[in-house]
Image: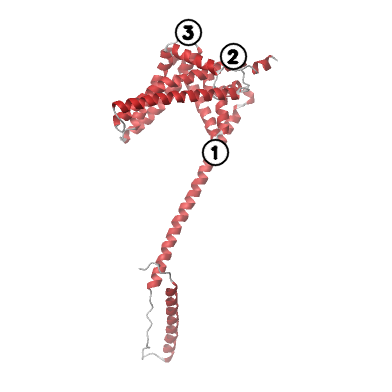
């Protein structure tokens, strides 16, 4: 009975979520923003390198991009630690140090959730939305509850269970709010660039990349804080959930993701084969059309010499044979003339 009452408890309201998110953002501003500086600076360097025309720099940009992605996961681990232990003072160095021990598990869970959600989105989007909502707390659980792999994935679904629509609704609200804030700040960036430098130059592109990194550093922590508070509220409402490893519930999520990836690969192969067939048919058709045009041109200009008299030194048998051959040549020549008369007026001629 207690479980039924708990499952009917409403989640935190949007007003309180906004208020609490903003309060933590202001209180922990230096920490939450500081943890985002390193990964987004690396992303900024990656973008600056990719805008250069030097082909030798592109491999370096690729490596820096991978390091930036890992740095973002590492920074998010530190941010979760700051939010989990917000009742005490945690330094940036300590947060990074504690997050380091969770980095491998976080990368693995990121790969798992990316594979599952990415594959399910390929199955006509709706399954992707459902699984993205179920699994959105998996990375938080890795750090906050020290779970690993599929246990964190399944546990996220257990927290969201019975609260799918409230969780989805609150997630959409913060997504829209962050997008609005982001676009407002980017509009300010555009005004600054337009007023001081103007658009179209390399300096303007560089300044936009730098200011975009600053905007990301300021905005992204808001979404992290919101999602952590939502997870914390679910945990308060439902209590600590447990996962039975023997049931292997996560296997079905992997199967769904695999089906999606296999489906898109099969469809790509199918469309590529159809495209190849169409191109081959077009090529062969053009080649045959060229041969037919050449044949028509040759036919329209061809003539057969037909002798009008027979040599005098032939035997009667030879004269008879040659006469028969000449008759056949004359009939063929008459047939060619008939065909030439039936040719269209625009038939190509050599």
Which of the 4 image quarters holds residue 312? bottom left
Q: Is residue 40 left or right of residue 245?
A: left
Q: Give the color scheme: rainbow, by chain, secondary structure or one colour.
A: secondary structure
Query: Which mark lies nearer to you, 1 or 2?
Result: 2
Q: Report the Cα–Cα distance between label 1 and label 2.
A: 39 Å
Q: Residue at horizontal 48%, vertical 49%?
A: 275
Query: Which mark lies nearer to you, 3 or 2?
Result: 2
Q: Residue furthest right?
A: 1
Q: Report the Cα–Cα distance between label 1 and label 3.
A: 48 Å
Residue 105 image point, x, y percent: 50, 22
- The quarter of the image holding the C terminus is bottom left
Residue 109 image point, x, y percent: 52, 25
Q: Residue furthest top?
A: 88
The answer to whether residue 328 is seen in the rendering is yes
Residue 20 vs residue 187, the one in the foreground? 187
Q: How packed is label 3: few (under 14 Cα within 10 Å), some, or many (20 or more)? A: few
Q: Is residue 228 above or below residue 190?
A: above
The answer to whether residue 102 is seen in the rendering is no
Q: Is residue 130 above or below residue 314?
A: above
Q: Which residue is mark 2?
A: 236
First in sequence: mark 1 or mark 3? 3
Q: Residue at horizontal 45%, vertical 15%?
A: 25
Q: Which residue is mark 3?
A: 88
Tell me the SS state at disc 2.
helix
Residue 116 image point, x, y percent: 54, 30
Query: Which mark lies nearer to you, 1 or 3?
Result: 3
Tell me the SS state at disc 1.
helix
First in sequence: mark 3 or mark 2? 3
Q: Report the Cα–Cα distance between label 3 and label 2.
A: 20 Å
Q: Tag on residue 332?
A: none
Q: Tag on residue 262?
A: 1
Q: Residue at horizontal 43%, vertical 62%?
A: 289
């Amino acid at each position: 009975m207690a479980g039924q009452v708990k499952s009917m408890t409403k989640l935190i309201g949007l007003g309180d979520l906004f208020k609490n998110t903003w309060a933590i953002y202001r209180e922990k501003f230096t920490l939450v923003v500081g943890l985002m500086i390193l990964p987004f600076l690396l992303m900024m360097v990656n973008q600056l390198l990719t805008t250069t025309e030097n082909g030798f720099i592109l491999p370096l940009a690729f490596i820096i991009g991978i390091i930036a992605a890992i740095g973002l996961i590492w920074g998010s681990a530190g941010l979760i630690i700051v939010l989990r232990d917000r009742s005490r003072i945690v330094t940036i160095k300590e947060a990074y140090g504690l997050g380091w021990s969770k980095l491998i598990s976080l990368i693995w869970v990121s790969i798992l959730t990316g594979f599952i959600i990415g594959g399910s989105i390929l199955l006509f989007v709706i399954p992707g939305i459902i699984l993205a909502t179920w699994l959105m707390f998996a990375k938080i659980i890795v750090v906050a509850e020290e779970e690993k792999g599929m246990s964190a994935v399944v546990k996220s679904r257990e927290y969201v269970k019975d609260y799918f629509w409230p969780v989805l609704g609150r997630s959409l609200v913060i997504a829209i709010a962050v997008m609005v804030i982001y676009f407002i700040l980017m509009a300010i960036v555009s005004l600054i660039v337009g007023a001081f430098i103007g658009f179209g130059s390399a300096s303007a592109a560089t300044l936009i990349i730098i200011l975009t990194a600053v905007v990301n550093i300021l905005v992204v922590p808001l979404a992290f804080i919101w999602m952590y508070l939502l997870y914390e509220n679910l945990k308060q409402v439902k209590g600590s959930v447990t996962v039975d490893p023997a049931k292997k519930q996560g296997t079905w999520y992997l199967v769904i993701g695999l089906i999606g990836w296999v489906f898109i690969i099969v469809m790509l192969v199918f469309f590529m084969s159809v495209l190849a067939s169409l191109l081959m048919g077009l090529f062969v058709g053009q080649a045959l059309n060229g041969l037919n045009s050449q044949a028509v041109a040759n036919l329209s200009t061809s003539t057969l010499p037909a002798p009008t008299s027979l040599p005098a030194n032939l035997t009667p048998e030879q004269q008879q044979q040659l006469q028969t051959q000449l008759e056949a040549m004359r009939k063929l020549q008459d047939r060619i003339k008939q065909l030439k008369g039936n040719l269209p007026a625009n038939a190509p001629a050599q």
